[in-house]
Image (tube, rainbow, N blue to C red):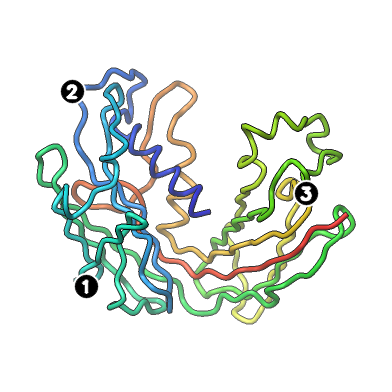
């Protein structure tokens, strides 16, 4: 899911200057922005905080300058006034000096220089309450189409949004399920360009309202399992910031060609997402 959401943020980098106008030639409307992809988790290390920039729709894209760094852009970033460090290996920001708790408000503040202009943005998010937990982390071997992989979990009070990132760990031509009932005409050569389309799946449950000790059962459908072999499913209990961004970021262009910004909670010169969630992981093996 991180990969999918990061792609959404990268898409925003190129389209946010076109909101409300179907015309692509928008040189006069371009304004530099700080593009953020930041998720925090209770009891987890603060890491993989990505700070990027937007570009003119009709201009040349310099891929080496997408990431904003302390060296090239004088980036200063903090969460609840705790400074974050830049990781040269992952090109993201982190800190070991901040404890993320349940049901607590956090504020991210970022300043950077983009195109010679000093920018600043900040955003607030509240982490979910404690309660979400997967009851079984290893589902064992599951026979394809005989039994559906079923994830059982308890919920967090006040959190109705739960997302599922499904990853076929050994995805390849040799273990693709060609005799599936959904796309039976897929050929081996088709997978060369579309492997990740089948490998990574994302789904979600909305407006889930259960008592704290109740168990919810989520069945993974055949449309989310295209390969035999081992799977990893990361389940997220996401707060409002995460829910609103996920639900609106995929529909940024209307049928008439107009672009509309997804719901974001940034003040100043920022776009993207700053959200809190609880994550848990489930694994299983799909066999014939």
Q: Residue at x 69, y 66 (%)?
A: 283
Q: Residue at x 40, y 76 (%)?
A: 103
Q: Is residue 166 above or below residue 9?
A: below
Residue at x 87%, y 59% (from the top left corner): 143
Q: Earlier in the sequence, mark 3 or mark 1?
A: 1
Residue 85 vs residue 167: left or right? left
| Cα–Cα gap, marks 2 and 1 | 37 Å
Q: Nearer the viewer, residue 160 or 268?
A: 268
Could you give the CA–CA distance between mark 3 and mark 1, rounded to whole angstroms? 44 Å
In x, y percent, where is residue 50? 33, 54
Choose between 63 and 137: the one closer to the eye: 63
Task: Name the residue tied to disc 1.
Answer: 82
Q: Please report whichever mark, 3 or 2, sits nearer to the chain's N-terminal start.
A: 2
Q: Is residue 231 left or right of residue 246?
A: right
Helix, strand or loop at disc 2? helix
Task: State the count of labels.
Answer: 3
Q: Position of residue 173 (x, y in %)?
A: 74, 41
Mark 3–mark 1 contact, CB under 8 Å?
no
- Classed neighbour count for the residue bearing mark 2: other residues with Cα under 10 Å, few (<14), some (14–19), many (≥20): few
In the image, residue 86 sits, relative to residue 180, either above or below, namely below
Res 45 → quadrant:
bottom left
Lateral position of residue 225 relative to residue 248, left or right: right
* Residue hosting label 2: 28
For disc 3, the marked residue is: 222
How packed is label 1: few (under 14 Cα within 10 Å), some, or many (20 or more)? Answer: some
């Amino acid at each position: 899911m991180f990969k999918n959401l990061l792609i959404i943020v990268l898409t925003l980098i190129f389209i946010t200057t076109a909101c409300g106008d179907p015309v692509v030639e928008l040189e006069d409307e371009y304004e530099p922005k700080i593009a953020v992809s930041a998720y925090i988790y209770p009891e987890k290390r603060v890491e993989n905080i990505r700070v990027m920039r937007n570009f003119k729709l009709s201009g040349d894209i310099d891929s080496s300058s997408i990431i904003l760094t302390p060296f090239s852009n004088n980036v200063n970033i903090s969460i609840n006034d705790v400074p974050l460090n830049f990781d040269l290996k992952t090109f993201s920001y982190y800190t070991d000096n901040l404890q993320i708790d349940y049901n607590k408000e956090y504020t991210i503040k970022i300043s950077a220089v983009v195109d010679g202009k000093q920018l600043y943005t900040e955003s607030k998010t509240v982490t979910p309450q404690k309660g979400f937990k997967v009851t079984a982390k290893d589902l064992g071997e599951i026979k394809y189409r005989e039994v559906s992989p079923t994830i059982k979990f308890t919920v967090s009070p006040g959190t109705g949004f739960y997302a599922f990132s499904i990853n076929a760990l050994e995805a390849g031509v040799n273990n693709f399920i060609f005799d599936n009932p959904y796309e039976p005409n897929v050929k081996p050569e088709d997978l060369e360009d579309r492997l990740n389309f089948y490998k990574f799946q994302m789904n979600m449950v909305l407006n889930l309202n259960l008592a704290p000790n109740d168990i919810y059962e989520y069945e993974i459908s055949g449309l989310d399992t295209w390969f035999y072999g081992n799977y990893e499913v990361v389940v997220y209990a996401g707060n409002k910031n995460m829910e609103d961004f996920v639900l609106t970021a995929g529909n940024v262009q209307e049928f008439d060609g107009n672009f509309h910004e997804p719901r974001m909670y940034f003040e100043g010169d920022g776009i993207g997402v700053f959200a809190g969630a609880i994550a848990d992981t489930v694994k299983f093996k799909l066999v014939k």
